[in-house]
Amino acid sequence: MLEYARVRLLSAFRSAFPLGALASHSCGICSWPAAFLTLCRRFCLPSSNGLLFLAFLAVAAPLSAQSTRVDGIVRDPSGAPIAGASVILQIGAEQNRVSTDSAGKFLFPGVTLKTGKLLVSAQGFASVTRDFDATDGQPIHLDIVVPFATSEERVVVTATRIESRLSDVADSEVALDSDDLLATPALATDDKLRQIPGFSLFRRSGSRTANPTTLGVSLSGLGTSGASRALVLEDGVPLNDPFGGWIYWDRIPQQALDGVELVRRGESSLYGGDALSGAVQFLTRQPLGPDVALEVSYGSENTPDLSLWTGSRIGPWDLSLASELFHTGGYILVPASIRGPVDTPANSQDAVLDFTVGHRLGEKGRIFGRTSYFTEDRSNGTRIQTNDTQLGTGVVGVDAPLGTAGFLSARAYGSTQSYSQNFSSVAANRMTESLTDRQHVPSQQGGGSVFWSRAAGSRQTLGLGASADEVIGSSHEDFFSSGTHTAFQTSGGRQRSVAAYGEDIFRITSKWTATASFRFDDVRNFDAATVRTPLAPPGLPVTTLFPDRTDTAFSPRLSLLYAANKSVSLTASGYRSFRSPTLNELYRSFRMGDVLTDANAALVPERLTGAEAGANVRAFREKLTLRGNFFWNDVTDPIESVTLSTTPTLITEQRENLGRTRSRGVELDAESRLNKHLEISGGYQYVAATVVSFPANAGLVGLDVPEVPRSQFTVQARYWHPSSFVLSVEGRFVGRQFDDSLNQFLLPRYFALDLLVSRSLGRGVEAFAAFENLFDQRYYVELTPTPMLGPPIQARVGLRYRRLRDTRPA
């Protein structure tokens, strides 16, 4: 009997103190480590002393580790249970995760008597944190209501360079996460962003078939002449073409994207000259474990596409690889009624490979290096008109918490690029074409930026930064006339910019927040020249040297946010921004079809003065979010392609600084989460963009800025059942706009509808079908002077495979 009691007590002792696993040499009776053998020899014997000691341990151990249970139910705002929600129990540094069952219930048995937190998250809902106290030993039951997710609760970084909730940002900013991008039927990245009112490229056509020099982005109705009037970033590194300012929208594999943020107003106070009308920032994934995201599809016009991102983490290190391969056979741009033998499908193919290695610095810091290679080639609608690009980039970045000294973010980058293009002249009957210009444009870019921020007390956050960038580029051209090589010309130069900037976010009261920022830029153009060598007839080279020049800009911004209550906030901002002409605008002429655009080395920077005021409203228990803004932008010396002459076969233009243009308008955004499966959203922008001054040609005053529609309207409806089915419908209306500065070529309005249907096949695999321009609406994208059509219906089917750890905070 004594031996039986001793064995039972030893069993309880080992359960309470399982220290034997910590050493290879241990007591054969109690399994404690060898360091305790002296104690064991005394007490681990069939004696009364041993039994008394073991009885003490058997009673004391459970008392020191008492536990209780924590359970509950997770509901949506209507009271319906949420199945499959993630519930994390956190006590100190330890975490335990469970998922809710079909009734929305969860259970954590045997919770140690301590205080802790429950972190609850579910797709389509905002994350919720609940504290609990289990020190009294009583079971804890929690009824947790999780609000529907709204874009207002997302954390953004682009508008202020400092992490902030979208609802706390006074600027007009839109944020899309990876789920939003996946649910968009469009294949190309720029086409996905067209669902945001105010976003537009130089022309209505997209990156699948358009010439890359027409793919600059404009926001808020400022228009563009090819060079982007908005800055595009990837994780804080500029993507704008260093020579021409346009955007290669397929440079980032889509499966590598974790989200995108878009600020629709001037951001030069923090980002400098490329951010005249705003900024677009793509944020990429960071691996949390062995992660994979893969999409393969095949569509109409012989369009295969493969996008892959994969990564893993090994201790503090993380590695990721991303790639995308795309090809489309395209379509013929010219309407059938005027089509000729020279017309061929406008098509493209591209490939990108991206490798990133990172190392964590504490909980929130990271240093990383990235290298990528991108290549593409395009046929622009005839046999001769083609172009190709090769681009290699390298990036080193660090995001480092400095403890009480704040936070430091820095980037250094470099790139080298080769761009080539052929231009032709097409006969009026489109029977023949002849080569007019063969162009090769090499360029290099190097630069970096650093930004430091720190909380100054409980109400204020300060930030200081600096940046530098240099571009070297030239255009080498062979000119032809009726098959004869007539001349060779080289034009180019260097552009160097340095800047310093600062920011102050001040929470005046619990309701009022003021954000002030400023930036000083110094932009120098130098070593610029054009050398032309006549060949037919032969002659001596003629060299034209352009004088060095320096432009400076001071870009301030002041924003106010008034939070009237939890549901209503008012915003107002005033700002100045600028954009320097690119080397391409200064020194490179080009011909697109029957439009010849001449360079202009005398161009000066564009300068914008603007203001906006708006309101954000959340109603019906946050099921409905409304945002509205009125904006006013005056641009002095805007760079536009001004028509000099027009013939049936050729329109001659030149880049010139107009006197002043004015864009005034209103934008409205709405988002409604009707229930946990159905979401409807939409947006509208009306803008009147007109020329208000142009001393060189008063006939342009009062005319519309080309390529800016008066009205844009978008609507999206999305139904999803996370475990099985997704249905997404998107519509886009674009109003009338002029295709030229003289307002002679009017592009009619159009409406296009897109559709995506997907179904889960289990084990992370999903099948989908997507349709763009579902009703095959044929609309014009260009009329100068040859009409060009937008894409017909485009359909594709594919598979997705995703094995990802959740990258969003619970």
Image (spheres, helix red, strand yellow):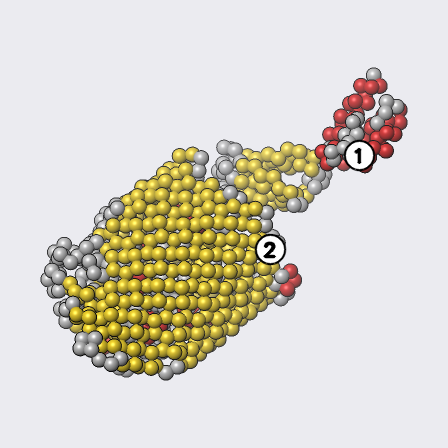
Whether residue 776 sits left or right of residue 619 in the image: it is left
Give the residue at x 82% y 19%.
3
Counting from the top left corner in percent of width and height, residue 547 is at 37, 83
Hey, which quadrant is residue 70 in on the image?
top right
User: Sequence-wise, which precedes: disc 2 or disc 1?
Assistant: 1
Residue 557 position (above or below residue 408): below
Query: Residue under circle 2?
Result: 361
Query: Residue under circle 1?
Result: 34
Tag count: 2
Counting from the top left corner in percent of width and height, residue 86 is at 53, 40
> Looking at the image, which is closer to me, 648 or 735?
648
Q: Amino acid at mark 2?
A: Leu
Give the residue at x 31% y 77%.
530
Hey, which quadrant is residue 648 in on the image?
bottom left
Residue 197 position (above or below residue 31): below
Hey, which quadrant is residue 460 in on the image?
bottom right
> Looking at the image, which is closer to me, 79 or 546?
546
Give the residue at x 26% y 77%.
532
Q: Amino acid at mark 1?
A: Ala
Decide if residue 629 is in sight here: no
The residues bearing labels 2 and 1 have C-alpha atoms spaced at a distance of 38 Å
Counting from the top left corner in percent of width and height, residue 701 is at 26, 77
Give the residue at x 78% y 27%.
28
User: Where does the N terminus fall, quadrant-wise?
Assistant: top right
Residue at disc 2, secondary structure:
strand
Mark 2, other Cα within 10 Å: few <14 / some 14–19 / many ≥20: some
Counting from the top left corner in percent of width and height, residue 376 is at 32, 56
